[in-house]
Image: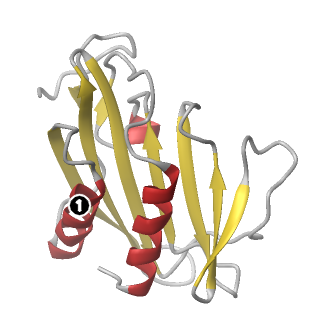
Amino acid sequence: MTSAAASPTSPTPQRIAADGQGDERAKRLLARLRQAVPATVPVTDTGESRVTDRGGAGASASYHASVLMQPEQRFYAALSAEVMDPPTTSGEATCAPWMYACSTREIGDTTAVITGDNASQTVLVDVYRADHGVPLRVRATRSVTRDTSLFWQGGTPAPQIPVSTDALVALAASLITNPV
């Protein structure tokens, strides 16, 4: 992949500059993401980074990892995760009326809010702690954009997301019970 900018309609996703730089924790997060990709789905590229925010009430870091998948010839999808340490966002672990295909699941002492399904454009799993902090976000998408994939832009969207919602929740649970 090249670092050239690509339009959202480019037939092949193009690598874009990501914030931060990789480190060991981000690499461990990437390794866990790769394990969640079905063996039948080729991974064509990967990316990881660590972003440090020294503002506000103290330093925090976000660890990002993503895999670019090609579930079918000429079609692309992405699986990404973001770990915030400490969490910099908070909210209620509930489904709002505007959330498409929303459900919640308990994961130990945390709650996962799952929006979307495999027929939609994106499935998002946000994990909420009891103090309302959001330490983890896992996303699978069939449309590769900087916002959804973190490291690529463009490409023809896959007909469906190649990672099941249950696999995304299992990945989130494994990252909560056995952090990177």
Q: Of residues 55 and 48, which is closer to you in this image?
A: 48
* Rendered position, 20 above or below 75: below
Q: Amino acid at mark 1?
A: Gln
Q: Position of residue 147 (x, y in %)?
A: 46, 39
Name the image quarter holding residue 59: bottom left
Residue visible at 88% across and 47% down in the picture: 97
The residue identified by callout 1 is: 35
Q: Residues within 10 Å of mark 1 (few under 14, many from 20)?
A: few
In the image, taking residue 30 as reference, residue 137 lies left or right, namely right
In the image, taking residue 71 as reference, residue 83 lies left or right, namely right
In the image, taking residue 154 as reference, residue 143 lies left or right, namely right
In the image, taking residue 4 as reference, residue 131 lies left or right, namely right
Q: Quadrant of the N terminus?
A: top left
Q: Do we see residue 17 in this rendering?
A: no
Q: Do we see residue 70 in this rendering?
A: yes
Name the image quarter holding residue 175: bottom left
Q: Quadrant of the C terminus?
A: bottom left
* Rendered position, 6 above or below 2: above
Q: Position of residue 15 (x, y in %)?
A: 21, 32
Q: Position of residue 26 (x, y in %)?
A: 24, 67
Residue visible at 11% across and 26% down in the picture: 2
